[in-house]
Amino acid sequence: MKLIKQENQMGCGIACAAVILNFSYKRTFKLFSLGKADFTGFTCKEIVDALKRGGLDYSYKYIKPRLKNIIYKEDTIVFIQRSNKYKHGHYLVRGRNIWMDPWINFPNANRRSGFRKRLPGKSIYVIFSN
């Protein structure tokens, strides 16, 4: 799994999709609605739609107890619920036994991506391959 940093304020979903598609951030950005990457961010449905435009069949679900283990499947994206640190929530993508965080040094303006052993908050939505 390669590291891809988010290049926009609300571009964590784009970076996670880029990892799964094995595209660059800029190429993946073109699969999304314009204008949302800097201000509002993207919903799970919008990420699923972008993955479909990239040629992959993905779905999303709210994480209920019976779906808890699906988040550990490789190439799965999770949405971390809103918190004091992540005011708008945050997306991360699962690699082989590790999480790729597209803005690991948040809120530092000099963005870096990196790997985490654990999620930085509670995951509430999962985007997974069908």
Image: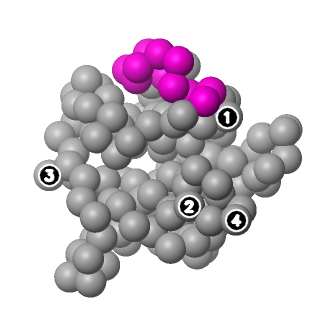
Q: Circle 3 sits in a helix, a strand or a loop, which is it?
A: loop
Identify the residue shown where x is 45% and y is 69%.
123
Could you tell me which secondary element the residue under label 4 belongs to? loop
Q: Which residues are magenta?
A: 29-39
Badge nearest the viewer, 1 or 4: 4
How far is the residue under mark 3 from the one under mark 2? 27 Å
Q: Position of residue 74 (x, y in %)?
A: 36, 61
Asked where in the image residue 82 lies, by quadrant, the reply is bottom right
Any part of residue 35 in sight: yes
Distance in Å between CA atoms under marks 3 and 1: 29 Å
Q: Which residue is mark 3?
A: 130
Quarter assignment of residue 38: top right
- Comparing 11 with 87, the one in front is 87
Q: Are marks 3 and 4 in contact (CB under 8 Å)?
A: no
Q: Earlier in the sequence, mark 2 or mark 1?
A: 1
Q: Measure how far apart labels 1 and 4 are at the Cα level.
A: 17 Å
Of labels 3 and 1, earlier in sequence is: 1
Q: What residue is shown at x 40% (from left), y 54% (from top)? A: 77
97 vs 100: above or below = below
- Crowding at mark 4 (Cα within 10 Å: few <14, some 14-19, many 20+): few
Q: Which residue in the protein does label 1 denote?
A: 9
Residue 82 vs residue 58, the one in the foreground? 82
Which residue sits furthest left? 130
- Other residues around mark 2 within 10 Å, as few (<14) / some (14–19) / many (≥20): some
- Say which label, 3 or 4, has the lower sequence index: 4
What amino acid does circle 1 point to?
A: Gln
- Amino acid at pointer 4: Asn
Residue shown at 37%/71% (left/top)?
A: 72
